[in-house]
Image (cartoon, rainbow, N blue to C red):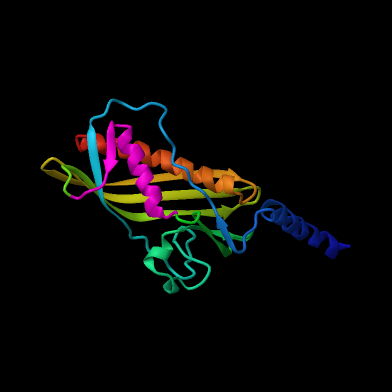
């Protein structure tokens, strides 16, 4: 009788873990679309800004101890830098062990998502994005972080996302550098696409707000 009563809390915890995390598939690759928030109204046009370069400089590791460190389900050294560009997170089971990958849809990379963030940020200040390194107004971007992870809890999962970029902007004859970090989080009970998207959406909103502050300082 005593042994049975001792097992009950353990069985309850296992049942709770499976009920919380079991309905979200954690094996294989999950594809998640990440739309960039758009403004409802834009100011009068002030000119154009060229994106000279966007580089994915994220650091990946094999089996990192910290879930916020990028990794893949396999050997990261088997991927080229271009192939890594699609990966944006790892799925995990109810005990926090890394499982399958989370990636952007086919044809999308972290560079394309950051490009959309930059376009949105400049458009909110009246600028249109173009291409061409000889433009009077130009920006170079290095993506240091673009990753999401979750931490299992007793009654819910904590989803977190972070986007961190280093900028070099040229306006006329002046060049300035700055960094922008966007962070977002939310709580959910299953590892659904919607929960991953919400964490990223909040990170994007935070990123755009801070990017706008830096553009003000840079004179845009």
For residue 110, what is the image quadrant? bottom left
Q: Quadrant of the C terminus?
A: top left
Is residue 182 located in the magenta-colored stretch of the structure? no
- Image location (x, y in percent) of residue 61: 43, 68
Is residue 124 located in the magenta-colored stretch of the structure? yes
For residue 143, what is the image quadrant? bottom left
Q: Residue at x 22, y 34 (%)?
A: 47
Q: Residue at x 52, y 45 (%)?
A: 197
Q: Quadrant of the N terminus?
A: bottom right
Q: Count the marks.
A: 0
Q: Is residue 220 above or below residue 117?
A: above
Report whether 111 appears left or right of 131. right
Per the rendered image, the range of residues in magenta is 108-133
Report whether 1 appears left or right of 101. right
- Image location (x, y in percent) of residue 59: 37, 63
For residue 8, what is the image quadrant? bottom right
Q: Residue at x 53, y 42 (%)?
A: 198
Q: Is residue 139 above or below residue 94?
A: above
Q: Residue at x 53, y 51 (%)?
A: 32
- Image location (x, y in percent) of residue 18: 71, 56
Residue found farthest to the right:
1
Q: Is residue 149 above or below residue 182?
A: below
Report whether 33 appears left or right of 163. right
Residue found farthest to the left:
173
């Amino acid at each position: 009788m005593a042994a049975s009563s001792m097992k009950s809390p353990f069985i309850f915890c296992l049942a709770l873990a499976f009920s919380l995390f079991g309905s979200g598939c954690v094996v294989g690759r999950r594809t998640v679309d990440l739309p960039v928030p758009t403004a409802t109204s834009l100011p009068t046009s002030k000119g154009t800004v060229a994106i000279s370069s966007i580089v994915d400089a994220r650091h990946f590791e094999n089996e990192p101890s910290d879930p916020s460190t990028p990794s893949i389900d396999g050997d990261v050294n088997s991927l080229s830098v271009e192939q890594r560009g699609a990966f944006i997170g790892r799925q995990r089971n109810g005990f926090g062990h890394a499982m399958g990958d989370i990636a952007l849809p086919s044809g999308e990379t972290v560079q394309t998502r950051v490009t959309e963030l930059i376009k949105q940020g400049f458009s909110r200040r009246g600028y249109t994005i173009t291409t061409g390194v000889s433009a009077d107004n130009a920006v170079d971007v290095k993506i240091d972080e673009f990753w999401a992870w979750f931490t299992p809890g007793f009654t819910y999962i904590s989803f977190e996302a972070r986007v961190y970029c280093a900028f070099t902007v040229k306006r006329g004859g002046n060049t300035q550098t700055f960094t922008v970090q966007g962070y977002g989080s939310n709580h959910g009970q299953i590892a659904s696409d919607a929960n991953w998207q919400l964490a990223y959406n909040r990170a994007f909103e935070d990123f755009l707000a801070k990017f706008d502050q830096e553009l003000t300082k840079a004179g845009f």
